[in-house]
Image (cartoon, rainbow, N blue to C red):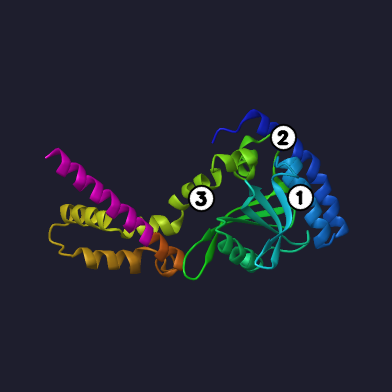
Amino acid sequence: MALPKKVQQRLSTGIKKFQPVLKSAIDRDVNESDTVLIVRDMLSDLLGFDPFQDLTAEYAIRGRYVDLAIVKSDRPVVLVEVKAIGTELHDRHVRQAVDYAANEGVEWVILTNGQFWRIYKVIFSQPINSELVDEIDILALNTRSVKDLEQLYPITPEGIKKDELSSFYRRKRAINRFFLGAILRSTPIVSAVRRELRKLEPEVKITEGELRLLIEKEVLKREVVEDDQGKEAFRIVKRKQNRRAKARAQHSENNS
């Protein structure tokens, strides 16, 4: 992604400002309420959100509240769940916020203790689920590294306007082990492997079903096949491949 110069400068300046603030907060072991204040300032001064128009504290959802929300046209686009700065973050900390997000149709949730920022994609399935997309350690960022600064770009106003969160998620999903495992098990790839195998070893007789089973049981790790993420990735790959096949068939029909 191309990081705009003004965003690069703001992020670099903001990191220099907040790294000492976070270190001091860790030393003082500040509580959750004080951490929320630090995070709100980081959302404004570091990431660039207008504190009066783009942010709201204790956003109400069905009578309950999330710590912070990034809003656009008075609608939340990202919910932010804050834990005290010394708290070790776990997926369980974000479950309630994910449920809130699902009720509002919000796709993104950030879980943070100020130092670590974990970005989750809400998966609108039954039951509602979430996927950890990225984790950023503010104290580990190098202000001179554009690559480090790019980690924060998707959660800036400029990045959200360009839907960089979705782009980042698609890129990461396309190269994770579940998606690649699903591609390796898909019909076009299994067929191609079977054809190549028959060229190399003509005497070997094996069906596509038998070959897929070997790939699933002997080649891939069990979790890549049996984990919920693996199953969901396989459904996504199959759906995309079916869509492409229909498009090719329609194109051929139109040109015949």
Mark 2 surroundings within 10 Å by alpha-carbon count, few (fewer than 14), some (14 through 19), many (20 or more): some
Residue at point 29% right, 67% down? 214
Quarter-of-image position of residue 190: bottom left
- Residue at left 28%, top 49%? 244
**Rounded to the nearest whole Å, what is the CA distance between mark 1 and mark 3?**
24 Å
The x and y percentages for residue 13 are 76, 35
Does label 1 or label 3 sit earlier along the sequence?
A: 1
- Badge 2 or badge 1: first in the primary sequence: 2
Q: In the image, 40: left or right of 125?
A: right
Say whether residue 253 is visible. yes
Q: Magenta span has 131?
A: no
| Residue under label 1 | 40
Amino acid at dot 3: Tyr
Quarter occupied by the C terminus: top left
**Mark 1 Cα-neighbour bin, 10 Å: few <14, some 14–19, many ≥20:** many
Give the quarter of the figure containing the N terminus: top right
* Mark sitting on residue 169: 3
Whether 243 is among the magenta residues is yes
Name the residue rendered at 50%, 71% in the picture.
127
* Amino acid type, residue under disc 2 in the picture: Arg
> Can you tell which of label 2 and label 1 is closer to the viewer?
1
Residues under labels 2 and 1: Cα distance?
16 Å
Marks 3 and 2 close (CB-CB < 8 Å):
no
Disc 3, SS: helix
Read off the magenta span.
235-256
Percent from the top left, x then y, of residue 145? 66, 36
Front residue of 110/78: it is 78
Kind of element beneath mark 2:
helix
Residue at which label 2 appears = 10
